[in-house]
Image: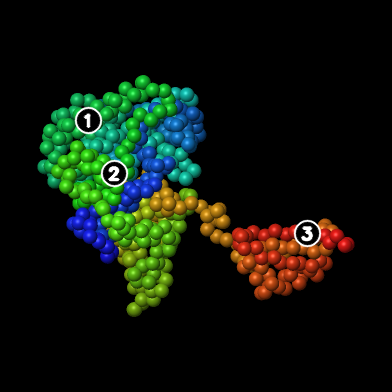
Amino acid sequence: MHIRNLGTNPILKEACMDKELIINALGPEIRVALLENNVLVEIYVERQDEGNIAGNIYKGRVQRVLPGMQAAFVDVNLKQAAFIYVDEVLNGVTPPPEGVYLQQENDEPEPETDAEADASAGENGPISGRWPGRARPDRRAIEEMLSEGQEILVQVARSPIGSKGARLTNYISLPGRFLVLMPTVDHIGISRRITDEAERARLKEIVEAMRTQPYGYIVRTAGEGVPREVIAQEMEFLNNLWNHIQARFHEVAAPKMLHEELTVTLRCVRDLLAHEADRVIIDSSEVYHTVYDFIKKFMPRLSNSVGLYTGEEPIFDAYNLEVDVQRALKKKVWLKCGGYIVIEITEALVAIDVNTGRYVGKRNFAETVLKTNLEAVKEIAYQIRLRNLGGIIIIDFIDMESKADQEKVYNTLREALSRDKAKTNVLPMSDMGLIQMTRKRVVKSLPRMMCEPCFYCEGEGMLLSRRSICYNIFREVCRQGADSGGNRFHIKVHPVIADLLLGQESHLISALEDRVGRQICIYPIDDYHLEQYDIEEILDKSS
């Protein structure tokens, strides 16, 4: 548990609750931290020049259709061309029979249309439309629906990540406080987190009775217990917003943004306050007033839940969060038992390796392995959520011979991930001790947001060994010495390599001088990179 330095700030003293949102808005970037029992569990970072655009709606122009990929590139006025797959094109499937959307079992949306899984905080992007709860009908080819130069209405389903452009969808979703409007899908769903059957039936009856268009709606968790008139007001607001977007589509020329999602601060306040957090503390007076006005307008009963931090110490320092953020960027994470996990983020997937480290156990090897794996499971689930890791994730646990132990680790992982709002899919452990899983990825992970490839190793994460560098120098001098007319060679290297060549590897210099018949002089250069070296051929004037 973190020990907080509360100082004399009365707001901070009153804020010692189980769940809090801490917003650091003083500076060039905005950071929003979600704390559970004083422990950092989620962090969102947004910068002016690379904000999260998931949820934004554009009028785009098709640049190129790729039949072989069943996808198309679309210009929406971003740095990189965005792309859309055939499954996300509105006419990409043959419409199902009339009324099929309202025939969901238990009125429960499929995971990919769950309001809490895909629309929470706007961080997980818009809801994938398609056909909720039903098998996908026959697909049409993308070249039959899109053509170059065509103007289309699209929403960003996933922000650009690395070299990949934004991913688009035609299936628009507009999240509100209590509802999510899906104007292109005729479907009514209730959040899974609302478990009372009578309340689920009440909410569905309200939405069905008040909708005037065949639009889809999902009632979010925050809608539980909300009066009919409040739901009616939000439904009217979302419908008017959709009508405005449609009107703008016909008024402006492509490419053009038609609707911008809320800032990370307001998204988090809208979707995390009350259910994921009890209080919001902000260090910027300007942002505080913006948030307060937003809460007063849309969430008036929570207007007393926002506080302004006025302490002299930076707010993340006061909550001891800076250390947690820096730790979330490290590859190696130590476990309490003495073992550790290593997290490697690659272009295609995330690999997590579990090791016993310093832990040697007390009884037998099987017990040691099981305890390490179980402790690693909790840390892995925590790190995945904290770092916002997504896509394909491969976890290499320490080998366990017992099937019962493997099943225990698998079930523990699934239980630990159940608290994660992002959609996850976990496969059983393989015979090789691997667990494969996927996690919905919409925005950059924390390491990709806050780090960049090493300009020394160009992101490889490895350097040539010092001995390998010495051997490369040896070979290069041999090449140049074969047709050289100089008297000696001057070799400029990093000081560490110079010490090695003049010490432990001095025999290489002697061998070189014998082989090329010239003197070799080593010069250490402080500013050189470890792998950098220059070989100069010197010709004396006297000769």
Residue 299 vs residue 126: left or right? left
Residue shown at 38%/30% (left/top)? 257
- Report which residue position mark 1 lands on: 237
Instruction: Determine if residue 403 is in view.
Output: no
Per the image, label 2 sits on a secondary structure element best described as helix
Identify the image quadrant of residue 522: bottom right
Marked residue nearer the N-terminal end (3 or 1): 1
Q: Earlier in the sequence, mark 2 or mark 1?
A: 1
**Nearest the camera: 460 or 193?**
460
The mark nearer the N terminus, 2 or 3, is 2
Identify which residue, 122 or 196, lies in the foreground.
122
Q: What amino acid is labelled 3 in the image?
A: Glu
- Disc 2 residue type? Val
Q: Position of residue 460 (x, y in %)?
A: 54, 56
Q: What x and y, as percent, mark residue 326?
A: 39, 59
Front: mark 2 or 1 = 2
Examine the rendered structure and indicate whether residue 348 appears above or below residue 135. below
Quadrant containing the C terminus in the rendered view: bottom right
Structural distance between the alpha carbons of marks 2 and 3: 64 Å
The answer to whether residue 175 of the structure is visible from this angle is yes
Q: Mark 1: which amino acid?
A: Phe
Q: Is residue 404 above or below residue 297?
A: below
Give the structural element (helix, strand or loop) at label 3: strand
Q: Which residue is the site of mark 2?
A: 287
